[in-house]
Amino acid sequence: MTGADLVLVAHGTRSRAGIDTVAALAEAVSRRVGPVRTAFVDVLGPSPAEVLRDRDPDVPVVLVPAFLASGYHVHADVPRGVAESGHRRATVTRALGPHPVLTQVLERRLRAAGRRPGDAVVLAAAGSSDPRARHDVRRAAAMLSARVRREVPVGYIATGTPTVPEVVQRLRAAGERRVFVASYLLAPGLFHTRLADAGADGIADPLGADDAIAELIAERFRLARTGVGVSGRSSAAVRRSTGH
């Protein structure tokens, strides 16, 4: 799949800071692998289908979902966009998380927020009704637990329980003096702003356009382009699974 194009697929947000973060991440990836197009599955455009319709159908395209867990958007929205576009040579990689690189960035964000060894940590995720996404978030929490050397419970911001404030309160009741929230979000936006009311001693910034994450995306693209280590699906497989 030499000469393939890269499409970075994000959720979409009305937050200017969030939009700028995705743009900065795409720019950081482009410095590593060449031109990058950006698509969004919600709120903003262009959609994956619209981006693919603008591409030469004979030129391979790799879509990298910039999601931290494999929920509905990754398993349904992105493949559906590929199928609707009719593009014949598109490959969708797996989601970004969970991954050790993300764990490392989370820890750095926590330290920047003032978290010290021994302080309690809550992993704050947007939440999902998809059990696969919830499983991925629990794996991310386990990875962060190993990194900070103490158990990290999960709190949800929008969908699911327990909520972040509930987990913070529970840790306080258990005697924790300092509690910090690790924001398991890619970019600033409505979800991150909600964490200000969680009652924690500090809120870490979202993962953002970190160079390590840009390199992770670039590596996903390189592997898909060479056909090595790809767990995503080709456009032919997508069409079969969606009935097209």
Image (tube, rainbow, N blue to C red):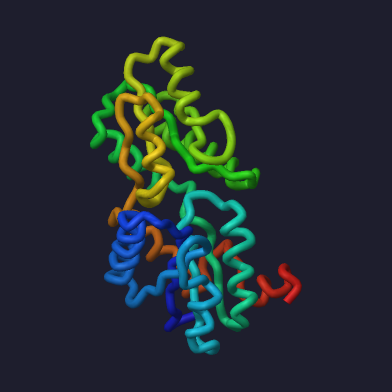
Q: Nearer the viewer, residue 148 or 71?
A: 71
Task: Say which residue appears at 52% left-offset and 40% top-offset.
Answer: 158
Q: Nearer the viewer, residue 101 or 136?
A: 136
Q: Is residue 214 left or right of residue 139?
A: left
Measuring from the top left, give residue 99's x and y in whole percent: 45, 48
Measuring from the top left, give residue 38's x and y in whole percent: 41, 70
Q: In which image quadrant can residue 22 be found? A: bottom left
Q: Give the vertical position of 140 relative to 201 (above or below).
A: below
Q: Give the vertical position of 233 relative to 75 (above or below).
A: below
Q: Give the vertical position of 68 relative to 156 (above or below).
A: below
Measuring from the top left, give residue 149's x and y in whole percent: 39, 26
Measuring from the top left, give residue 52's x and y in whole percent: 52, 79
Task: Say which residue appears at 35% left-offset and 49% top-offset.
Answer: 188
Q: Is residue 17 left or right of residue 227?
A: left
Q: In which image quadrant can residue 235 be found? A: bottom right
Q: Nearer the viewer, residue 157 or 236?
A: 157
Task: Say which residue appears at 54% left-offset and 65% top-offset.
Answer: 230
Q: Give the vertical position of 153 relative to 108 (above or below).
A: above
Q: Is residue 221 left or right of residue 134?
A: left
Give the total of numbered labels: 0
Outermost residue to the right:
243
User: Which quadrant of the rendered structure holds the C terminus?
Assistant: bottom right
Q: Is residue 205 left or right of residue 85?
A: left
